[in-house]
């Protein structure tokens, strides 16, 4: 906006003949305000000067691209997530020989309608070989504790040279229902390997089942063989 060589009459002049010639240029000046520095009011900011960063101050990210780049950088170097294996599949793979690593046995244990305890020894898997590398000659011997007499003892056949013997042999005990809670079925896995007739046979492991806790909905189950409480069979 400009005014060049314009004449303006001066009011109150003697005779009314006085005038003023002016040339004017109107311009707009923008100023930026910065924060109060403590002297009582805002100050104009001149040419912006980037302050120097002290060594102890952290670097300032000045753009969205830098923020995204710095956030994505560690993620690019992360390893891909590992898929979680189902618990049942993990148990099947790692506990094929049981939690003790000495084998598992499949049994059917149920209380029958004729006041009899029925036990079926189906099979054993993943028995250990002997110290000299030979395969065992395993059989299964049962006791209905606390009775350890001959009347309580039941035995399967001996399976030669096998770490995975199959039996499918059935045994019964006559017992009134009110005595179940006081009885424990002891299942011993014994190695009959040996040349001497009177040689004592070492126990490879055992399973103890509380007859008072039998589940009528799960009569056939796999059981982990535990280390035997005593080493030799009578």
Image (cartoon, rainbow, N blue to C red):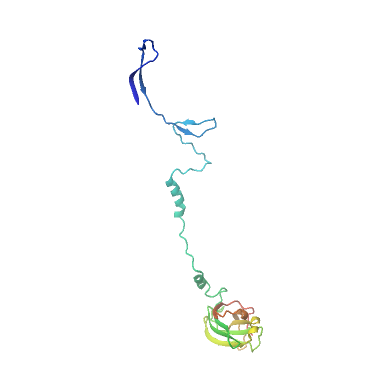
Camera-side residue of 93 and 214: 214
Q: Is residue 128 above or below residue 62?
A: below
Do we see residue 32 in this rendering? Answer: yes
Q: Quadrant of residue 6?
A: top left
Residue 12 in the figure: left or right of residue 229: left
Residue 28 in the figure: left or right of residue 223: left
Point out residue 117 in the picture as x, y percentages from the top left corner.
59, 85
The residue lying at 55 percent from left, 85 percent from top is: 120
Camera-side residue of 93 and 174: 174
The residue lying at 52 percent from left, 71 percent from top is: 91
Q: Quadrant of residue 153?
A: bottom right
Quadrant in the picture for the N terminus: top left
Q: Is residue 10 above or below residue 65?
A: above
- Residue lying at the far top of the rendered structure: 15
Point out residue 107 in the picture as x, y percentages from the top left corner.
55, 82
Q: Is residue 92 above or below residue 160?
A: above
Do we see residue 193 in this rendering? Answer: no
Camera-side residue of 114 and 162: 114
């Amino acid at each position: 906006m400009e005014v060049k060589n314009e004449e303006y009459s001066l009011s109150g002049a003697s005779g009314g003949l006085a005038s003023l010639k002016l040339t004017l240029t109107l311009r707009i000046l923008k100023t930026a305000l910065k924060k109060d520095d403590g002297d009582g009011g805002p100050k104009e900011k001149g040419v912006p000067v980037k302050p120097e960063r002290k060594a102890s101050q952290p670097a300032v990210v000045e753009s969205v691209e830098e923020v995204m780049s710095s956030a994505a950088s560690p993620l690019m170097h992360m390893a891909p997530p590992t898929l979680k294996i189902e618990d049942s599949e993990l148990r099947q793979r790692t506990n094929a020989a049981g939690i003790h690593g000495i084998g598992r046995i499949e049994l059917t244990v149920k209380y029958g309608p004729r006041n009899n305890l029925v036990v079926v020894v189906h099979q054993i898997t993943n028995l250990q070989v002997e110290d000299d590398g030979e395969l065992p000659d395993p059989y299964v011997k049962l006791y209905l504790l606390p009775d350890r007499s001959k009347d309580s003892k039941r035995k399967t056949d001996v399976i030669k040279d096998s770490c995975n013997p199959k039996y499918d042999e059935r045994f019964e005990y006559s017992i009134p229902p009110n005595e179940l809670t006081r009885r424990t079925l002891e299942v011993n896995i014994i190695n009959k390997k040996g040349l001497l007739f009177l040689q004592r046979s070492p126990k490879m492991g055992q399973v103890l089942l509380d007859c008072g806790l039998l589940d009528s909905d799960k009569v056939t189950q796999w059981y982990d063989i535990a280390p035997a409480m005593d080493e030799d069979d009578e």
